[in-house]
Amino acid sequence: MTIFALSLATLSGSNIALTRLYARSPKGKRVYGAVPRNRRANITLLASLSLLGMGEAFLLEGSADTAVFELYILPLPPSDYECCDMVTVRLNPYSQAQYETNRYSVPVKHARRTVTLKAYPFTIEIFDESLLLASHPRCYEREQDVFDPLHYLPLIETKPASFDYVKPLKRWRKDWPTCYHQMLRLLRESWPDGKGVQEFVRVLMLHERFPAIQMEQAIERAISYGCVHLDGVLYCLHELAKEALPSEPEEPKPLDLTSRPDLDAIGNQPVDLSRYEKLLKLRW
């Protein structure tokens, strides 16, 4: 251990109701002041000092005992401290977790479960033990519903008649590209009994695996091919993935062994099968 690793920890206490010993006033005027007589809290300050400078300071209301001092000198935890408000909440029947006055959606298969909600300054994360269920931008307004429409697609697939009335989808449809509306119309014309809507919902579920830009390109290509269904969109996604792959590398050139003619014949000599015949005649 070097001297630079040594650190001196000390503590001191004071009362925040202390007043000045002296006061000033205009010449010939009396000074008036009030003394609270130590009626406020006592504050203990713990700090450390080393050759590298002053360390962390810790303020404590009241006096410090052995437990507090040991807590101060303990090393920092190995993992980063999560600067968030962590609460345990129970999902409502609409598969939402409420924090403060706002409600955040969770995949419907986890409805009516108790989950852990972590509220960061800009995001809300919802966990089922260690499994991350949902992540949303934090809303600072009041009485708002923050939805991820992908959370409700499995339920809409079983109830296609609700497609036009579900609140999360209504918001999402406003931002859909034209090709989405075109595919939905074509599927409804092909399967007017609700199967077309179910097929379109299965296409929307692909957003969980593929980015939105790639999905838009695949749907446009599927419509141009005339394969307006889930398999057609999957085929176009695989096509786009192949096109995005880099071109095949050139075959490596053979090693130049002109300077080592003794190695040039290795690997190119003819196979001598008589050697295998000798092995068969041996007795082990």
Image (tube, helix red, strand yellow):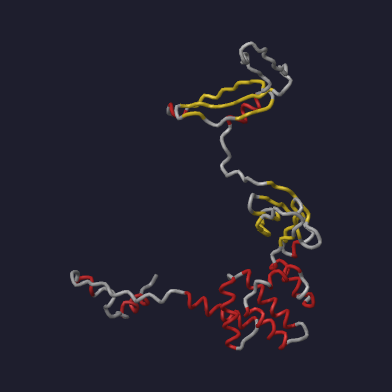
Q: Residue furthest front?
A: 28
* Front in this rendered view, residue 99 or 171: 171
**Location of the C terminus (image quadrant):** bottom left
Say above or below: 277 vs 122: below
Q: Residue at x 70, y 76 (%)?
A: 201
List x then y, in percent, for residue 186: 68, 86
Say above or below: 5 vs 246: above
Q: Quadrant of residue 178?
A: bottom right
Q: Quadrant of residue 92?
A: bottom right
Q: Quadrant of residue 79?
A: top right
**Location of the N terminus (image quadrant):** top left
Say above or below: 243 vs 135: below
Residue 265 placement, left or right of 231: left
Residue 53 placement, left or right of 73: left
List x then y, in percent, for residue 120: 65, 50
List x then y, in percent, for residue 43: 66, 24
Q: Residue at x 58, y 88 (%)?
A: 225
* Front in this rendered view, residue 264 or 183: 183
Q: Residue at x 52, y 30 (%)?
A: 55
List x then y, in percent, for residue 50: 48, 27
Residue 163 placement, left or right of 19: right
* Front in this rendered view, residue 230 or 197: 197
Q: Residue at x 61, y 12 (%)?
A: 27
How many marks can you see?
0
Q: Residue furthest top?
A: 28
